[in-house]
Image (cartoon, rainbow, N blue to C red):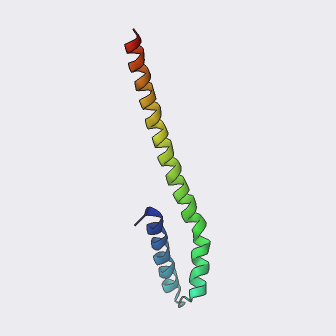
Amino acid sequence: MSHTSHSLSKGRRSNVGLFLLSGNSPTKESMMKNLTHAEPYFIMREKKELQKRLLDKNNELLELMQRVEKYLMRIEK
Protein backbone atom coordinates (compact mmCIF):
# COMPACT_ATOMS: atom_id res chain seq x y z
CA MET A 1 0.00 0.00 0.00
CA SER A 2 1.38 3.38 -0.94
CA HIS A 3 1.95 6.08 1.66
CA THR A 4 -0.77 8.28 0.17
CA SER A 5 -3.51 5.67 0.37
CA HIS A 6 -2.43 4.87 3.92
CA SER A 7 -2.70 8.54 4.90
CA LEU A 8 -6.14 8.83 3.33
CA SER A 9 -7.44 5.65 4.97
CA LYS A 10 -6.16 6.92 8.32
CA GLY A 11 -8.04 10.18 7.67
CA ARG A 12 -11.26 8.32 6.96
CA ARG A 13 -11.00 6.41 10.24
CA SER A 14 -10.44 9.60 12.23
CA ASN A 15 -13.44 11.20 10.49
CA VAL A 16 -15.62 8.27 11.54
CA GLY A 17 -14.27 8.69 15.07
CA LEU A 18 -15.26 12.36 15.07
CA PHE A 19 -18.81 11.47 14.06
CA LEU A 20 -19.02 8.78 16.72
CA LEU A 21 -17.79 11.17 19.41
CA SER A 22 -20.31 13.82 18.40
CA GLY A 23 -23.13 11.31 18.76
CA ASN A 24 -24.35 11.84 15.19
CA SER A 25 -24.62 8.89 12.89
CA PRO A 26 -22.53 9.59 9.79
CA THR A 27 -24.32 9.72 6.48
CA LYS A 28 -22.43 9.00 3.30
CA GLU A 29 -22.83 12.64 2.22
CA SER A 30 -21.55 14.09 5.48
CA MET A 31 -18.59 11.70 5.54
CA MET A 32 -17.69 12.54 1.93
CA LYS A 33 -17.99 16.26 2.70
CA ASN A 34 -15.73 15.83 5.73
CA LEU A 35 -13.19 13.81 3.73
CA THR A 36 -13.19 16.36 0.91
CA HIS A 37 -12.58 19.11 3.47
CA ALA A 38 -9.62 17.13 4.89
CA GLU A 39 -8.04 16.37 1.50
CA PRO A 40 -6.03 19.62 1.18
CA TYR A 41 -4.33 18.80 4.52
CA PHE A 42 -3.28 15.36 3.27
CA ILE A 43 -2.12 16.80 -0.05
CA MET A 44 -0.07 19.49 1.72
CA ARG A 45 1.44 16.92 4.09
CA GLU A 46 2.35 14.67 1.15
CA LYS A 47 3.79 17.67 -0.72
CA LYS A 48 5.98 18.61 2.26
CA GLU A 49 7.22 15.03 2.56
CA LEU A 50 8.04 14.89 -1.17
CA GLN A 51 9.82 18.26 -0.98
CA LYS A 52 11.94 16.98 1.92
CA ARG A 53 12.81 13.80 0.01
CA LEU A 54 13.72 15.88 -3.06
CA LEU A 55 15.95 18.13 -0.95
CA ASP A 56 17.65 15.07 0.57
CA LYS A 57 18.26 13.61 -2.90
CA ASN A 58 19.60 16.95 -4.15
CA ASN A 59 22.02 17.06 -1.21
CA GLU A 60 23.14 13.49 -1.96
CA LEU A 61 23.70 14.42 -5.60
CA LEU A 62 25.66 17.53 -4.66
CA GLU A 63 27.85 15.49 -2.32
CA LEU A 64 28.51 12.90 -5.03
CA MET A 65 29.35 15.62 -7.55
CA GLN A 66 31.86 17.16 -5.12
CA ARG A 67 33.47 13.76 -4.54
CA VAL A 68 33.76 13.18 -8.30
CA GLU A 69 35.24 16.65 -8.76
CA LYS A 70 37.88 15.97 -6.07
CA TYR A 71 38.64 12.60 -7.66
CA LEU A 72 39.04 14.16 -11.13
CA MET A 73 41.34 16.87 -9.74
CA ARG A 74 43.53 14.16 -8.19
CA ILE A 75 43.69 12.29 -11.50
CA GLU A 76 44.63 15.43 -13.46
CA LYS A 77 47.69 16.10 -11.26
Q: Quadrant of residue 38?
A: bottom right
**Total numbered labels:** 0
Q: Quadrant of the N terminus?
A: bottom left
Q: Nearer the viewer, residue 57 or 25?
A: 57
Is 14 placed above or below 47 here?
Answer: below
Horizontal and vertical percent for residue 68? 41, 24
Horizontal and vertical percent for residue 63? 43, 31
Residue at 51% across, 52% down: 50
Residue at 58% across, 69% down: 39
Residue at 57% across, 64% down: 41
Q: Quadrant of the C terminus?
A: top left
Horizontal and vertical percent for residue 8? 49, 70
Farthest front residue? 76
Residue at 38% across, 20% down: 71
Horizontal and vertical percent for residue 10? 45, 72
Is 53 placed above or below 3 here?
Answer: above
Is 49 placed above or below 7 here?
Answer: above
